[in-house]
Image (cartoon, rainbow, N blue to C red):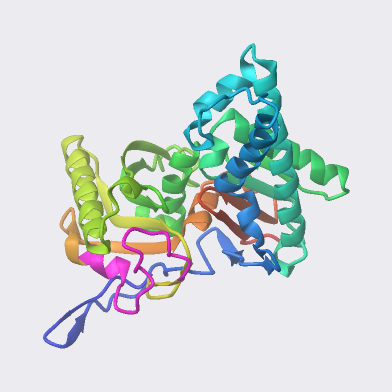
Amino acid sequence: MAKATTKRSGKVHGTREPIASHGAEQLPSVTISSYNLELRDKEGFIGDRASKRAFSAKLDDWRERLGKCDADPFGDVETAELTKKRLDKAMHGKDKEAAAVVLGAIEDFAQELAGVIRRFRRTKPWQNVKRIAVGGGFRGGRIGELAIARTDILLKADGIDVDLKPIRHHPDEAGLIGAAHLMPAWTLAGHDAILAVDIGGTNIRAGLVDLHMKKARDLSKAEVRTSELWRHADDEPSRTAAIEKLAAMLNDLISKAGQEGLTLAPIIGIGCPGLIRTDGSIDRGGQNLPGGTWESEHFNLPAALAKAIPEIGGHETVIVVHNDAVVQGLSEVPDMQDAKEWGVVTIGTGLGNATYVNRGKD
């Protein structure tokens, strides 16, 4: 990223050589061969068939059909009110009909996800991908894990040589831990933690990521020390209010780091939906973000945050932004060293996706 710049009296300040780039193709450990694929057919974006909303639609379809003969095991409860916890419980409960309905939705969803991955593999960046980490909020429950396993079996049965596995870290933490991999290791040396942000269509999460580089320089021991979650979808804030709230969350975490005696790197790593330009602005794909105007040519997220948090620990704040699926996938870098090309799909409000080539691999 080129460090976020500010203008005073018509002059641009901040000419430090870039140490990382917004939306970069070349990262310290990997090359990003693709992300945010927007493949379409006559029915629309194919990724929409494998989102959390798509799973709910599958479940709703089963319930509607059963409801016509008064056989819906969930009764009058709206599908939107069936939480992951309740669905997971239904899978293990005594109500076999409820479990069977959920299994039916899992099967239908897995068929759709397998179809999306087959379509991805027809593109050049995905052709040689052998391992795929699956993240996003849907992966966080037993339902998601079963859907991932079923998709893996469907692809293998179809002769497609690829392994699908749930992302190693909890998806809420993977999107923060991955931010550490945006920066060269030398920029993190001598620091205990960094600030990381995961911006989504429903929530914004900010956290302190313990680097533990003395234990593992490859960041394989990195973990989220603490985090704050704001469900912006409930508040429907303006873009300006959202940035002010995010800055307040980050300042609170900076204070906590100081209270706990942590040496905090003057870095904020951010995962954000959409295609990220080299200046950190969003080209497209940010329509679900709070306020709905993040793609404006008059708005720049890193510049706005640098203005709100100009320094961390007496050093000028460095901010780097990349696509949220890319960042979540980066948390898998230490576990993907035996692969040459690998990918990630994140199942959330939409279907995020990215492919990577490990640097230094023949």
**As rendered, which of 310 and 337 lies closer to the eye?**
310
**Residue at screen point 36% across, 40% down:** 210
User: What residue range appears in magenta?
Assistant: 284-306
| Extreme-left residue of the structure | 9
**Residue at screen point 19% across, 50% down:** 248
**Above or below for 179 versus 192:** below
Give the image quarter of residue 157. top right
| Extreme-front residue of the structure | 69
Q: Which quarter of the rendering shows the N terminus? A: bottom left
| Extreme-top residue of the structure | 94
Q: Is residue 155 left or right of residue 146?
A: right
Determine if residue 205 is in view. Answer: no
- The spot of residue 72 in percent (x, y) is 64, 26
Majority secondary structure in the magenta region: loop
Is residue 339 magenta-colored? no
Q: Is residue 77 left or right of residue 118?
A: left
Is residue 290 magenta-colored? yes
- The spot of residue 154 in percent (x, y) is 81, 42
Mark count = 0
Determine if residue 270 is in view. Answer: yes
**As rendered, which of 315 and 109 lies closer to the eye?**
109
- The spot of residue 251 in percent (x, y) is 19, 49
Q: Is residue 206 left or right of residue 140?
A: left
**Residue at screen point 41% across, 43% down:** 213
| Extreme-bottom residue of the structure | 10
